[in-house]
Image (cartoon, grey):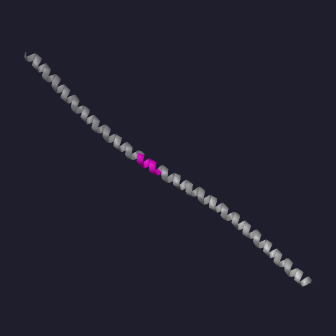
Amino acid sequence: MTVAQTEYDNELKARRDAEAEFTRLRVLVSGQAARLTTLSGDVKRQELREQLARQLHDNLKGLEHDISKTRVERDLILAEVEEIAAAKRFVMVSE
């Protein structure tokens, strides 16, 4: 009976050791999963920041283009107004 008890105790100890190792590994895997989730979130936030930066850059380029176009239109209108004013002065002087 002593031999059987010793074998049983050894198997029980081995089972408890295996269960403890399994629990330890499960905790490690859980920690790694949490870190991967955090990294994944960081990567997604970084990608979103880069996308927003590209959109802002594109919007800024569009606005700069619109401003340049508006300035050209303004300059043309001012030139036309100056032409009309000069023509009026010429007409007034001629009369």
The residue lying toward the viewer, choosing from 5 and 61, is: 5
What type of secondary structure mainly makes up the magenta span?
helix
**Residue 79, located in which quarter of the rendered image?**
top left
- Residue at (59% x, 58% y) in the render: 37
Task: Give x and y (percent) for residue 6.
Answer: 88, 80
Taking the view exactly as shown, the residue that stands out farthest to the top is: 95
The residue lying toward the viewer, choosing from 58 and 86, is: 58
Taking the view exactly as shown, the residue that stands out farthest to the right is: 2
- Residue at (14% x, 19% y) in the render: 89
15 to 70, vertically: above or below: below
- Residue at (55% x, 54% y) in the render: 42
Tell me the quarter of the image containing the C terminus: top left
In the image: residue 9, left or right of residue 45 = right
In the image: residue 9, left or right of residue 79 = right
Task: Give x and y (percent) for residue 54.
Answer: 42, 49
In the image: residue 75, left or right of residue 9 = left
34 to 6, vertically: above or below: above
The residue lying toward the viewer, choosing from 6 and 91, is: 6
- Residue at (21% x, 33% y) in the render: 76
Q: How many marks?
A: 0
Magenta segment boundaries in residue numbering: 50-55
Tell me the quarter of the image containing the N terminus: bottom right
Q: Is residue 19 magenta?
A: no
Task: Give x and y (percent) for residue 11.
Answer: 82, 78
Task: Give x and y (percent) for residue 88.
Answer: 14, 20
39 to 17, vertically: above or below: above
**Residue 26, located in which quarter of the rendered image?**
bottom right
